[in-house]
Amino acid sequence: MRIGPAGLFVVPQAGRITGELDLAFVGLTAKGPVQLAKPDILALRLSADEWKRAGNGIAATKELPVPESVSQVRTVVVDRWAARVGSLTVPK
């Protein structure tokens, strides 16, 4: 997936653009949501050039097993420094 950088709280630090995101992965089933993996921390440490290119989105990849009972997968992204939340739900 690609995370849009608009609205992320980032700060310049030691010549890098820095920020921190939490990524959570939830499976949606007929019986309710199930956690698919432990949440991950995505530490952003981008050069100025990488930040300019991030306008097309910041790439994040995670492979995880999805049980048969899951019909959709929701990825939740939390900007740790701004306490903002976004999510994306896709069919399995």
Image (cartoon, rainbow, N blue to C red):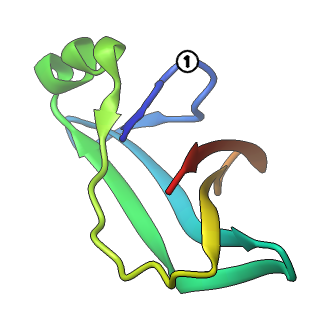
Percent across and percent down for residue 58 are: 32, 34
Any part of residue 26 in sight: no
What residue sits 59% from the left and 35% below the top? 9
State the count of labels.
1
As drawn, the residue found furthest toward the right would be 31
Tell me the element at label 1.
loop
Q: Position of residue 83 (x, y in %)?
A: 78, 50
Image point 26% across, 47% down: which residue?
45
Q: Is residue 33 left or right of residue 8?
A: right
Question: Where residue 88 appears, x then y in whole percent?
Answer: 62, 42
Q: Is residue 84 left or right of residue 63?
A: right
Does the rendering let one see residue 3? yes
Residue placed most toward the observer, 70 or 10: 70
| Relative to 2, residue 92 above or below | below
Q: Quadrant of residue 46?
A: top left
Left or right of residue 10, residue 13 in this image: left
Where 80 sits versus 45, above or below? Answer: below
> Which quadrant of the figure contains the N terminus?
top left
Mark 1 is on which residue type?
Answer: Ala
* Rendered location of residue 89, percent (x, y): 64, 46
Q: Residue at x 28, y 21 (%)?
A: 54
Mark 1 packing: few (<14 Cα in 10 Å), some, or many (20+)?
A: few
Residue underneath mark 1: 6
17 left or right, relative to 47 = right
Q: Is residue 2 above or below residue 82?
A: above
Instruction: Quadrant for residue 7, please give it.
Output: top right
Above or below 11: residue 26:
below
Residue at 58% in and 68% down: 24
